[in-house]
Image: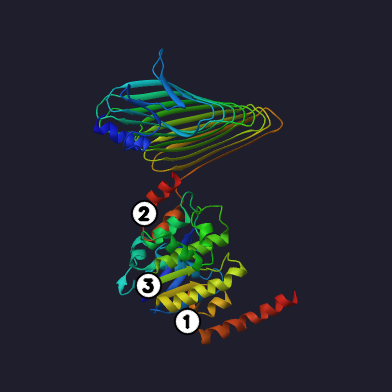
Amino acid sequence: MDEIQMDLLEKVAGLHELPTGAYNIRANGEKAGRNVTDNIDIVSKEDKPGIDIIIKPGTKNENVHIPVVVSESGLQDMVYNDFLIGEGADVTIIAGCGIHNGGDEESRHDGIHTFYVGKGAKVKYVEKHYGEGDGSGARVMNPTTIVKMEEDSHMEMETTQIKGVDSTDRITEAVLKEGATLVINEKLMTHGKQYAKTSFQVDLDGDGSSTNVVSRSVAKDDSSQLFLAKINGNARCSGHSECDAIIMGNARISAIPEITANNLDASLIHEAAIGKIAGDQIIKLMTLGLTEEEAEAQIISGFLK
Amino acid sequence: MLELRNLSFGVKDDNDKKEIIKNINFTFDDSKFFVITGPNGGGKSTLARLIAGIEKPTAGQIFFDGIDITDKSITERANLGISFAFQQPVRFKGIKVRDLIRLAARDEITIAKACDYLSEVGLCARDYINRDVDASLSGGELKRIEIATVIARGTKLSVFDEPEAGIDLWSFSNLIRIFERMHKEQHNSVIIISHQERILNVADEIIVIREGKIEAHGKKDEILPELLKDTDSCRFYTEEQ
């Protein structure tokens, strides 16, 4: 891997060197490194690009890193990754994608991640998306995440796209069985002329299942965002979705939450708020000696932290 | 030293022009404790906001240590040594109590030092230092954190806009002690907008503002007895209830 790729790797996965434990690094559409452990196997798919990550039942406290870096302008990369998480496992999966586009052609990484979370398993999924490069070519990422949760499983997703991705269409779909819990925290910032669409659909099929979908976003300059969150309560369940957005400059944001109760014991809530930074917040920080620009930066970084 | 020279402030309301501050001339001497009091709507809070730079006067000038700060921004005034505590503190999503105190101290202060400031305002630091300055805090808690940010700045002049509002009785004595200590230890000037007799009692000088003008000004011993005399009838009336 070259310097640009190593730098991207640090930005999206916080890695300065090869991680310990299981990992698979994909650079410019090719395998650039892989390690498996006794409990976690990673196998390349034969019929299409992508990998199967197989985590043995009962695996505890292990991490899997699966970063993707794209530094070749014009590369169109598409992967199908399946995660098979065994019963009772407790693991952290760190994914991320960084694109450096120094050319004039569109660079693109699309991924379909499918999670099969076994009975009683616990997964933390961390995903960071980042783009850079001074070429005029667009940096595009369209991640699809499909989550199938067995009884009493628990999944926490933390997804972040803070900078440099010109266009993104994020789709997250989940189906939850009895007692399963899904928590999603999404952080999103768009600037320039960027566009981001993010849509969630969570089907709460099992009694005692629950979900909390929280999105915090900032749209600057001429960028635009669309947030869609759909929760279907099909059993005795509870669901909550929240979109909290700050709008700046000429940016536009739409939030369309939808909740459907198909069961008398479904309890669903949605909240959505869009607005500019409160003037009082800036004034307060200015009375502490910050300039208006510093105050604004402080408020945004806190909001997206 | 803070000097207000022919200071006026007005707002336009439809076609009506309303004067809120009317040609005030006053000099706040160094290292003194001033309390500004007077009826609601008299212009007290506006005056405090004019000093902090949040509002700009329609006429007149403000001098701070001999420098004309009339056209200086809030930030410039803050950096010259003016602090301001809001009557209704601002809430932030994602900014922690310790972040706010660090910003106020303008220094990478230790957690222990940040905790000291919270303890000074009667908050158990360990319980608060990592909390967000958001809707999860009560009005009284926020108010005390607001005061802690001003203490952390330790500037030459501190202006408090009704610090007692929203503070429960139990914390009130603590609040008085904070002001007494600030006055004694820091040798800095303090201006407090207040209605509270116990805060008025800590003042070196009291200024009464009514209808945008200074109605009375003098040493505490001269002004306070007069003010309390005025309220006697009300107190009697309340007791009769």
Tags 3 and 2 touching, CB below 8 Å: no
Q: Which residue is drawn at 47% across and 53% down?
A: B96
Q: Establish if B208 lies above or below A52.
A: below
Instruction: In this rendered view, identify the residue nearer to me: B121 or A245.
Output: B121
Q: Tell me the mark number nearer the camera, choosing from 3 and 2.
A: 3
Label for residue B156?
3
Q: Which amino acid does label 2 sit on?
A: Glu
- Which residue is identified by label 1? B205
Give percent across and percent down for residue B151.
Answer: 44, 68
Instruction: In this rendered view, identify the residue nearer to me: B109 or B55.
Output: B109
- Whether residue A204 appears in this view of the structure is yes
Q: Establish if A305 lies above or below A85.
A: below
- Subunit ID for the residue under disc 2: A
Label for residue A66?
none
> Which quadrant holds residue A126?
top left
Kind of element beneath mark 1: strand
Give percent across and percent down for residue B178.
Answer: 50, 73
Give a yes or no on whether discs 3 and 2 share a subunit.
no
Label for residue A292?
2
The alpha-carbon separation of the residues under discs 1 and 2 comes to 35 Å
- Subunit ID for the residue under disc 3: B
